[in-house]
Image (tube, grey):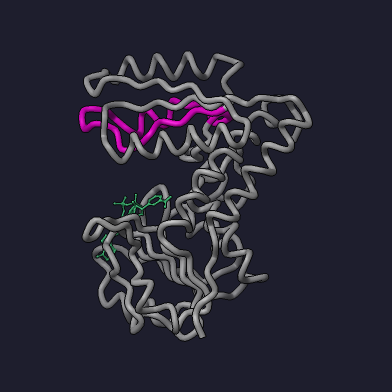
Amino acid sequence: MSAKIIDGKKIAAATLANIKENLTASGYVPKLAIILVGNDDASTIYVRNKQKSAVTAGIATELYHLADTTSQEEILELLDKCNQDSSINGIIVQLPLPAHLNTNEIINRISPLKDVDGFHPYNTGLLHNNEEPYFVAATPLGIMTMLKTVIKNLSGKNVVLIGASLIVGRPLATLLLNQECTVTITHIHTKNIKDLTSKADVLVAACGVANMVKKDWIKNDAILIDVGINRENGKLCGDIDFADVKEKAFAITPVPGGVGPMTVAMLLQNTYRAYLLQHDML
Ligand code: NAD
C-alpha cells in the first residue's frame, strides 16, 4: 500500500486561515520585522514567501533589506531599535548571514520575547530544561504538528534524525525527547547510518543531500519526515527518495508541499503568539 501523504501545504493553509480568523475577530495586527542582509537567491525567495503568507494570515511585515557590506554594529543597532519599538512584535534575521558577521552575537541581541524564530539561547535553554519557551523554532514546531496528524502518542517511539543543525536537528531532538521518544541524532560523521535509520519508527531527514534515503534505509511502515530542499535536474526534491520509499513507509511528507510551508506557517503562528504574550493575553 502506498504511504499516507502528510499534506503540509494543507495544514499550513488551515493554520494561516485560523490566525487570520482570530485576528479579524480581535482587530489586532501583529507586526514581524524581517532583517535580510545581502542578496542570496534562496534567502530572497524564503523572505518573499514569508511576506506573502503573512498577508494571508493578516500579519504585517517590515522588511529591512541591508547591503551585504553592512557592519555588525549597524545590525546590532537596528536590533536594539526593533527590540524597543512596541509596534514590532516579532523579529527574525534571515540566515545564513554574510561571513564577516557574527551570527551568534546577532541572534543573542534579539529580545527573547520577540525571538519568533526561537533561536535565542534563552528560548532554547528553556526548551532544553523541558520548560515552556516563549517560542520554539518554526521547522521543528511544524514537524511536531505534522507528526501529530499521523501518530497519537510518541512516547517510547524510536526516532532517528539525520542532521544535527541548530535550526532543525537539535531543537527537534529536544522536543521529541520531551515527548518521551528514544532519539538518535546522526550527522556527517556518523558511521553506518543505515543500521540506525532502518530501526526507526520515525525518521527525519534534514541533511541537504538529494534523495539520500532509499527504501533499504527504512523500516516497514515507518513515518518519514523530509526536511531537505535540494535541486536535482532542475527539480525540487528532498533528502528522501520519495518514489523509492513510498510503498514501504506508513506516512511521508512530500517535497515540495511538506515541511516548507509548515515552517512559514509556524513562524507566523509564533508572531501571533508574540503579540498575545506582549499584551499579557496568554
Ligand atoms: P546544515 O548544513 O546546518 O546541517 C546539515 C546537517 O546534516 C549537519 O548536521 C550535517 O552533519 C548533516 N549531514 C550532511 N551531510 C550528511 C550526510 N551525508 N549524512 C549524514 N548527515 C549529513 O543544514 P540545515 O540548515 O539543517 O538544513 C538541512 C536541509 O534542510 C537543507 O536541505 C535545507 O535547505 C533544509 N531545510 C529546510 C527547511 C524547511 O523549512 N523545509 C528548513 C530548514 C532547512
Is 88 placed left or right of 232 in the picture? right
Q: Residue at x 57, y 58 (%)?
A: 144
Compared with residue 27, is residue 20 higher up or lower down, i.e. above or below?
below
Quadrant (top left/top right/bottom left/bottom right) for the C terminus: top right
Give coordinates of residue 22: x percent, y percent. Answer: 74, 36
Q: Is residue 125 visible?
A: no
The answer to whether residue 257 is left or right of residue 147 is left
Task: Please state which of residues 111 and 252 is positioned toward the viewer in this rendering.
Answer: 252
Residue visible at 45% across and 77% down in the picture: 200
Which residue is pictured at 27% across the width and 69% down the height? Answer: 190
- What span is in magenta? 90-114
* Residue 177 visible somewhere in the drawing: yes
**Which quarter of the picture shows residue 205?**
bottom left
Vertical position of residue 178 compared to residue 102: above or below = below
Query: Is residue 193 covered in magenta?
Result: no
Give the quadrant of ligand 1. bottom left
